[in-house]
Amino acid sequence: MKKYSKALLIGLIISIISLAIFGITMLVKNGISGSLESQYAAERWQSDSGEVRYGQISCFIAEDAGFTFAQIPQIEQSIETKLTEDSYAAPEGAKLFLSSGFSETEQEYSVGSVSVNARTYCTGSDFFLIHPHVMTSGWYYTGDELMESGVILNEALAFKLFGGINVAGMKVTMGGRECVVLGVTSGPVSEKEKKQWTPEDPADEPCAYISSDFSMILDPELNVTCYELVLPNPVKDYAIQIAEECVSFPEGKIEFLQNTDRYSVVNIVKNLSSSSERVIKTGTVYYPYWENAARIADRTCVPLAFIFAVTAGVVAVYILFVISILFINKEKLIKSGILFAGAKISEAKLKLKQIHIKKRRKDNEENNDQI
């Protein structure tokens, strides 16, 4: 064993350094991915819904697939049926899963003589539970609220129309219909997502949100380009299997993505082989702003994946080296172990004997004192 002592020491030092680098890289990775709030909806929903593990699934759908908001209730019913068959039931007064469609269009907004064209995001009622936003005035629509005449403005659009941002409850005309301003948002909580939300200047680029109910009144044929789910996921791939079965389109028209654990070390390393394909847009599938932000983070994590792989490999090689040395010297180690154990047993027996002798001496002394 002595001839390996130097190699073992050097290997131990290198392994400790590798573990330190691994830890630092983990902190960097968490800094890159941790602020992407849209990628952690399952974790947030799970913490509010009990012990059942949840998974988040994104379905990116080609614009020419003909998927509309009117089709979503049927998909939700299919999902609920499958979950019920697998003995999942929603707690009283709560939802069992989240579901939200997304589409993008452009609408004209006007207040008096002021008129502004703005990018308009049409979303399902669970959208803001998956994609939290900072609200500077009012609040957003959630749950089963019927919002056929409500709109959320960003600060830029609110300033252009009203000259201020505290305008919740005020009226604005959009698409020829008078509607109520539900609130004003400064954008997604995540700064990385906000950069894709308004790629130019957030203070100057107007946009708004309306519910799917409202969008179906304005344009029943509006194409849904993203459909998101947060489902129970008790075992690996359970959630995505339900999504693939219930949200079915011809090949090439839909792309499924598991957001849950997207930025785990294992998945980051696995994605090394496909890193060149992880671009902002591919084929006919459209990626919304939060997915663009996530894909930029994916590419940023590529060099980190190399570091994870190398440092983990170094530690693994050192462990295998130690195991091999132990195996080669197993006979010597066994003999040494037996000798060591024998010596310890003899030492223990001697100590017990000495203790016994001391006790007898003490007893004799006490008896003599009494006499």
Image: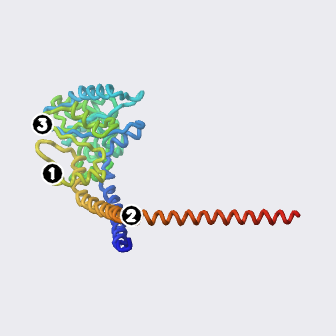
Disc 1 target residue: 277
> In the rendered view of the protein, which quadrant contains the N terminus?
bottom left
Outermost residue on the right side: it is: 371
Q: Which mark is residue 251?
A: 3
Give the SS element for disc 2: helix
Asked if 193 appears above or below 20 in the picture, the reply is: above
Give the SS element for disc 1: helix
Q: Earlier in the sequence, mark 1 or mark 3?
A: 3
Q: Earlier in the sequence, mark 2 or mark 3?
A: 3
Asked if 38 appears above or below 125 in the picture, the reply is: below
CB under 8 Å between discs 1 and 3: no
Of residues 249 and 227, the one drawn nearer to the viewer in this rendering: 249
Mark 3 Cα-neighbour bin, 10 Å: few <14, some 14–19, many ≥20: few
One can see residue 91 in this view: yes
CB under 8 Å between discs 1 and 2: no
Q: Rounded to the nearest whole Å, what is the CA distance between mark 2 and mark 3?
A: 61 Å
Q: Quadrant of residue 331?
A: bottom left
Mark 2 Cα-neighbour bin, 10 Å: few <14, some 14–19, many ≥20: few
Asked if 337 appears above or below 250 in the picture, the reply is: below
Q: Quadrant of residue 146?
A: top left
Hey, what amino acid is under mark 3? Glu
- Counting from the top left corner in percent of width and height, residue 249 is at 15, 33
Disc 2 target residue: 331
Hey, what amino acid is under mark 2? Glu
Q: Residue at x 11, y 42 (%)?
A: 284
Q: Which mark is residue 207?
A: none
Q: Rounded to the nearest whole Å, what is the CA distance between mark 1 and mark 3?
A: 18 Å
Of residues 15 and 294, the one drawn nearer to the viewer in this rendering: 15
Of residues 68 and 88, the one drawn nearer to the viewer in this rendering: 88
- Counting from the top left corner in percent of width and height, residue 163 is at 29, 46
Q: How many marks?
A: 3
